[in-house]
Amino acid sequence: MRRIKSSIVDGVGFDLLLVGIPLVFLILFSGLPLLYNVLMSFQEVDLFSLGDVFRPFVGLDNYRALLAQPEFWPIMWNTVIFVTCSIGGQFLLGFALAVFFNTGFRGSTFIRGLFLVSWVMPGLVVGATWNWILAGDFGVLNYILDSLGLISKNIFWRSDIDYSLWAVVITNIWLGTAFNMILLSVGLAGIPKDLYEAASLDGATAFQQFWTITVPMMRSTTGAVICLGLIFTLQQFDLFAAITSGGPANSSNVAQYWAWELSFRQYDFARGAAISTIMIAFVMIASVFYVRSTRHEVRG
């Protein structure tokens, strides 16, 4: 018993305990629900059989039914636009801010910390705030665009089918820019200053230093940031619930919100599970790329 206790307190047993407890937690609260969701997507499910594990097996019928629905491909296209534009906007703005704050001017650390306010705010709070900003009659965004002469009349961002999706994209870019900035700032801090000094002595301009030193040295960090952004964006639900509710006429609906609508508004749990399973597959692919992008990192 003394040997077992010693192993648990300080030894291999302690290491296994540290790994085992989180692993059991993940299996119980994440792994089993995921498996249950995948199983449900191949079954016939209604309100009366929702609590059962063993239900009539229908194979790929739920997936075929999804593909046959007229809104499937428009919603998938909305998802592609939302994910692509959100990740692109967050990364470009985050990178620009990271480079700006990396110059180390006075007060840069404090100001950079203020940007984290947007990231720590709950999605529903962010959505409620941007509801006021995007309001068609009195919104701040319309006022700014009108002052700059970019629009001639108010844009009803949340209720116009041409702008509703972009309303959520703009909000999500604002929400995720700070996270991208912090991660990219860490990558920039890891680049040796000697490289820039040597390049400067050789007569390289600021742009040449950025293109030949910063960009190649940030390759691993860039891959990790983009992959994490893909994972988080595919999971984004709160903003759609708070701003547009997928409307009007599904113009701002995306796969993750549609899965919730199918399950908890239309009570079509099987098709909701099917679209969720498709999303899980994309998230797992993004996770693989994330792991591959960080495998060359030097660990102390």
Image (spheres, helix red, strand yellow):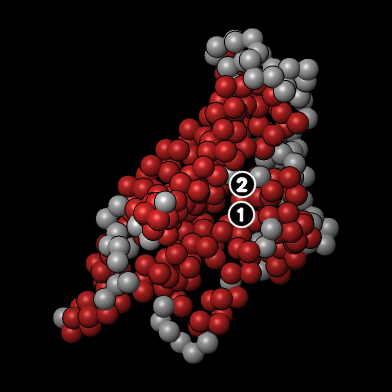
Is 41 located above or below residue 158 in the figure?
above
| Residue 54, above or below 192 | above
Q: Residue at x 79, y 60 (%)?
A: 132
Q: Residues within 10 Å of mark 1 (few under 14, many from 20)?
A: many
Relative vertical location of residue 157 with respect to residue 53 in this rendering, above or below: below
Give the class, few, some or many, for how many residues have Cα within 10 Å of label 2's Cα (few <14, many ≥20): some
Front residue of 250 and 293: 293
Residue 38 is situated, as x and y percent measured from the top left of the image, at 56, 25
Counting from the top left corner in percent of width and height, residue 54 is at 63, 15
The answer to whether one can see residue 166 in this image is no
Name the kind of residue labelled 2 in the image. Answer: Gln
Res. 5 visible in picture:
yes
Q: Earlier in the sequence, mark 2 or mark 1?
A: 1
> From the viewer's perspective, is 220 left or right of 23?
left
Identified at 24% across, 67% down, the residue is 212
Query: Judging from the image, what secondary structure is the residue with disc 1 in?
Result: helix
Q: Do residues under tags 2 and 1 come within 8 Å of each other at their CB atoms? A: yes
Q: Amino acid at mark 1?
A: Asn
The residue beneath circle 2 is 236
Q: Position of residue 125 (x, y in %)?
A: 74, 59
Indicate which disc residue 288 carries: none
* Residue at the image position 65 percent from the left and 27 percent from the top: 272
**Separation of residues labelled 2 and 1 (CA atoms):** 8 Å
Numbered badge on residue 172: 1
Decide which of 242, 56 is in the foreground and name it. 56
Secondary structure of the residue carrying tag 2 is loop
Question: Which residue reaches farthest front?
Answer: 1
